[in-house]
Image (cartoon, rainbow, N blue to C red):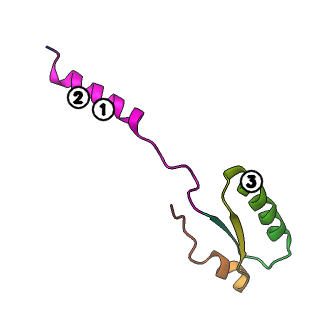
Amino acid sequence: MMPRRFWVVLIEALIPAFATAQPFPAKPVRIVGPQTPGGATDVFARLMAQKLGAKWGQPVVVENRAGAAGVVGSEGLRCTA
């Protein structure tokens, strides 16, 4: 009979093989630009959004929040899964 420790290690080694992750992204993605629309940052963000949307198969939206030297757009940013 195999020792109990062998079975515990074997089961722990096989657990990752059965775990599956959700595909990323699972919902629409939002890019927040802290500058005014029409500037270089906005143009670059829209080009990136177009490429990422095509690659990911999800809509990528650029949202411009100008004001207070970028503080308004940078305020409250967080990653949500």
The quadrant of the picture occupied by the N terminus is top left
Vertical relation: 30 (above or below) 24: below
Measure how far apart labels 3 and 1 are at the Cα level: 38 Å
Q: Amino acid at mark 3?
A: Ala
The extreme top residue here reads: 1
**Residue 44 location (% of width, % of height):** 81, 63
Label 1 neighbour load within 10 Å: few <14, some 14-19, many 20+:
few
Q: Amino acid at mark 2?
A: Val
Look at the image and give the residue range highlighted in magenta: 2-27
| Residue under pointer 3 | 54
Measure how far apart labels 2 and 1 are at the Cα level: 6 Å
Question: Is the residue under label 1 in contact with that under label 2 (CB below 8 Å)?
Answer: yes
| Residue under pointer 2 | 8
Q: Amino acid at mark 1?
A: Glu
Q: Left of 3 or right of it: where is 74?
A: right
Q: Does the magenta segment cover residue 26?
A: yes
Label 2 neighbour load within 10 Å: few <14, some 14-19, many 20+:
few
Measure how far apart labels 2 and 3 are at the Cα level: 44 Å
- Mark 3 falls on what kind of element? helix
Q: Residue at x 76, y 77 (%)?
A: 35
Q: Residue at x 16, y 19 (%)?
A: 3
Q: Left of 3 or right of it: where is 50?
A: right
Q: Nearer the viewer, mark 3 or mark 1?
A: 3
Dot placed on the residue nearer the N-terminal end, 3 or 1: 1
- Mark 2 falls on what kind of element? helix
- Mark 1 falls on what kind of element? helix
**Residue 66 location (% of width, % of height):** 73, 82
| Residue under pointer 1 | 12
Disc number placed over residue 21 in the picture, else none: none
**Residue 9 location (% of width, % of height):** 27, 27
Vertical relation: 61 (above or below) 76: above
